[in-house]
Amino acid sequence: MAIISTNAFTSYDSTDKAMKEDVENAIFNIDPTETMMLSTASRRDVGNTKFEWMTESLPTSASTNKQLEGNAVSYDATTNVTRNTNNCQISMRNATVTGTQQSTANYGKSSGEMAHQMALVSKALKIDMEKSILSHNPVIDGAEGIARQTRSFVHWLTTNDSYQSGGSHAGSATGAITDGTSTEMTEAIFVSAMEGMYDNGADFDTVIVGPSVKREISDFTGRSQARVAVDANTVSSNVTLFASDYGDVKIATSRHMYKSGETASHHTDVVFVDFDYWKLAFLRPFTMQDIARTADAETKQLVVEWGVQVDNEKAHGVIHDIEPIYVGGTA
């Protein structure tokens, strides 16, 4: 095989000269952006960096409540409310683009470089908030040079919290959660925790887990078999609804669960949520701010001042100290 002529003009001769590039006018990004807790929560506006709400409990019941005829009244103690407090924290992201870059034409950025960068940082900010909600962060009141911190959703859970050997809850709003021995998620651990939560009045409908723990739940031996034929071309080994003696719960997978490490010696959580009993509090909603120019560049900042309100922590639950990697075979 030979070229028709050594003088024929080929595409190789045109490289870096007059040949027009072919670049698809799109940018592909598959980084996870879903934020289940943040996106599903109800919201309230607050007027202070410190916000409060109230809870109460029924008086203790008894099976021996019987009285004499004509009995003189014995005055019961009245039930008072409990005031709960949390802080708003300031979260922000920003982007800076030079005047030249903003003026140039770029593939996949029809609205300009700044708009594209702000779309990215807005998604990143929401993931920051999601991770804060599911973290072990205690409350920090803040001071000169010390940023305020909202107490995380998980840190609030002190009634329906189960730990593995050596683990314990923080003991106070400002304390640290103590990790126990990292343990594989098993059906026995899962159901035992649900039983305790049911006894305490919880009626949650969703369990949020990381992807590896989701696999462990799909391996639970309560199923008749690990793989179920759906039709001639589909086999399912997936559990998305767990039907227990204490109610049916949806199993939701999150990529943003608290995780202290990537090995079996570290820990993650399994979080039980009743979405009717928690919300986000906003002192300042998501706000775009223009930062004063000090050079030939533009800076925009996205800021939000927010906090976590757990309406009644007994409505939720958490299993701590679960291995964040898939073990399998022993559930």
Image (tube, grey):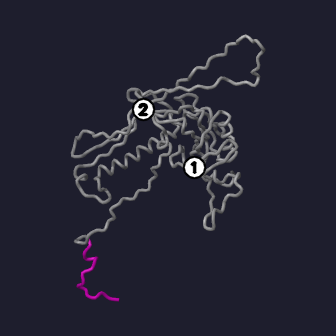
User: What residue is shown at x 61% (from left), y 67% (from top)?
Assistant: 233
Q: Say which label, 2 or 1, has the lower sequence index.
A: 2
Residue occupying the point 29% across, 53% down: 111
Magenta segment range?
A: 1-15
Q: Quadrant of residue 321?
A: top right
Given this view, does label 2 or label 1 mark the residue nearer the observer? 2
Is 3 in front, or is 317? Answer: 317
Classify residue 25 as left or right of residue 133. left
Q: In which quarter of the image is the N terminus?
A: bottom left
Q: What element carries label 2?
A: strand
Among the 4 quarters of the image, the one containing residue 7: bottom left
Crowd rating for badge 1 (residues with CA inside 10 Å; few <14, some 14–19, many 20+): few
> Residue at position x 73%, y 10% from top?
72
Q: Name the amino acid, label 1.
A: Thr
Query: Nearest the camera: 267 or 53?
Result: 53
Residue linked to disc 2: 45
Percent x, y for residue 110?
A: 29, 56
Q: Distance between the residues labelled 2 and 1?
A: 40 Å
Circle 1 SS class: loop
Whether residue 119 is situated above or below residue 305 in the rendered picture: below
**Label 2 packing within 10 angstroms: few (<14), some (14-19), many (20+):** few
Tell me, for residue 240, which label it has, or none.
none
Q: Is residue 267 visible?
A: no
- Name the side, left or right, on which 137 lies relative to 98: right
Residue 21, horizontal then vertical, whole percent: 28, 68
When the figure is inspected, residue 20 is found, relative to residue 246, above or below; the finding is below
x then y, percent, for residue 171: 58, 29
Q: Mark 1 points at which residue?
A: 263
Residue type marked 2: Asp
